[in-house]
Image (cartoon, rainbow, N blue to C red):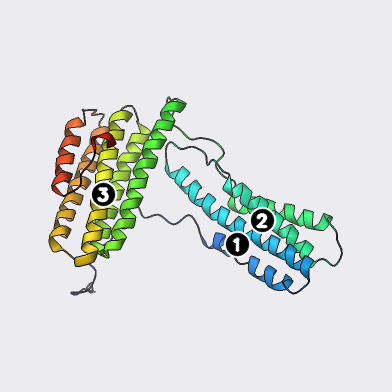
């Protein structure tokens, strides 16, 4: 029977958690769109001032289109993972399609010996249409929960944005520590926290308490992670690592328990739990202002 390889310097089995791993929304098809600008500049740069200028405009349009497409795909992925979300304020993918068509038109103009507008215009329209067919448009409608008014949806969206910001800051901070095991522990906590976030999105009846809960917990977790990463990155303090691991385990268990309670319809007052967490974080050197809750 095969035996799992392992050793002193081999990563542990639980080093990194791949639970709920997500594929990055920007794939190879999108990244390829950065390439056409290069041959366009190369083939028009020495063909005279007009051709070079037209080629540079076309290349700039394509480059901006590739960047907007990337940003649009990220925004759409965020929109699709949330129960309550506003449509993107800027339709980046649609603008990307328009710029792709403009770039194609200027590319044709740059290589024409005589000025003719019909062919570049038609090719631009075709390029823009193919872009929409290939990558689709941006989300064009807001997404909410039935029975929740617009103001309530906005409040839920703000809570989710704030919570996701704390989680992203935790991820960025823990990477500085260089500790793969702690990276996995933070990933597990993020998965648990996002379960709670999704639960609040689906049933935001007690949004005020949920905002205080998520804000205090996640702000404290972020601050503790930043502090640990800075300290551990400098001197590999074993005691700091042990304290942080214990705090992270407590937070993970607490979030999991709270998610189960919300799913069971238990709307108990969370003020006591928040005060307990404040004391726990204070013992680890993280101070939270009362205004933050």
Return the x and y of residue 255 as percentages of the image width and height: 24, 42
Residue at image mark 3: 223
Report the quarter where the C terminus lies. top left
**Residue contact at pointers 1 and 2, CB within 8 angstroms:** yes
**Disc 3 versus disc 1: nearer the observer:** 3
**Residue contact at pointers 2 and 3, CB within 8 angstroms:** no
Which element type, helix, strand or loop, lies under badge 2?
helix
Which badge, 2 or 3, comes first in the chain's sequence?
A: 2
| Image point (45%, 32%), residue name | 144
Residue at image mark 1: 33
Return the x and y of residue 147 as percentages of the image width and height: 43, 24
Return the x and y of residue 2 as percentages of the image width and height: 24, 74
Which badge, 3 or 1, comes first in the chain's sequence?
A: 1
Work out whether residue 74 or residue 1 is closer to the camera in this orientation and state it: 74
* Circle 1 residues within 10 Å: few <14, some 14–19, many ≥20: some
Residue at image mark 2: 100
Query: Which mark, by number, is residue 280?
Result: none
Return the x and y of residue 13 as percentages of the image width and height: 23, 64
- Is residue 130 in sight in this rendering? no
* Circle 3 residues within 10 Å: few <14, some 14–19, many ≥20: many
* Circle 2 residues within 10 Å: few <14, some 14–19, many ≥20: many
């Amino acid at each position: 029977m095969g035996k799992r390889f392992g050793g002193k310097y081999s990563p542990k089995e639980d080093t990194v958690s791949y639970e709920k791993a997500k594929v990055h929304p920007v794939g190879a098809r999108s990244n390829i769109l950065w390439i056409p600008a290069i041959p366009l500049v190369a083939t028009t740069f020495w063909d005279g001032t007009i051709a070079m200028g037209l080629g540079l405009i076309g290349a700039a349009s394509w480059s901006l289109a590739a960047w907007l497409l990337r940003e649009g795909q990220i925004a759409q992925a965020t929109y699709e993972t949330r129960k309550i979300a506003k449509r993107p304020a800027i339709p980046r993918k649609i603008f990307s399609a328009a710029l792709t068509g403009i770039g194609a038109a200027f590319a044709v103009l740059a290589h024409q010996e005589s000025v003719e507008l019909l062919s570049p215009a038609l090719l631009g329209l075709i390029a823009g249409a193919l872009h929409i067919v290939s990558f689709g448009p941006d989300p064009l409608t807001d997404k909410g929960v039935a029975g929740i008014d617009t103001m309530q949806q906005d409040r839920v969206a703000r809570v989710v944005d704030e919570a996701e910001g704390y989680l992203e800051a935790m991820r960025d901070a823990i990477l500085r520590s260089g500790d793969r095991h702690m990276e996995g522990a933070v990933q597990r906590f993020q998965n648990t926290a996002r379960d709670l976030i999704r639960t609040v999105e689906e049933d935001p009846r007690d949004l005020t308490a949920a905002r205080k809960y998520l804000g205090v917990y996640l702000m404290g977790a972020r601050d503790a992670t930043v502090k640990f990463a800075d300290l551990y990155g400098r001197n590999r303090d074993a005691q700091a690592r042990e304290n942080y691991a214990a705090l992270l385990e407590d937070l993970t268990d607490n979030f999991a328990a709270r998610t189960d309670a919300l799913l069971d319809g238990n709307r108990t007052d969370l003020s006591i739990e928040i005060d307990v967490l404040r004391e726990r974080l204070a013992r680890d050197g993280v101070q939270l202002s009362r205004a933050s809750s």
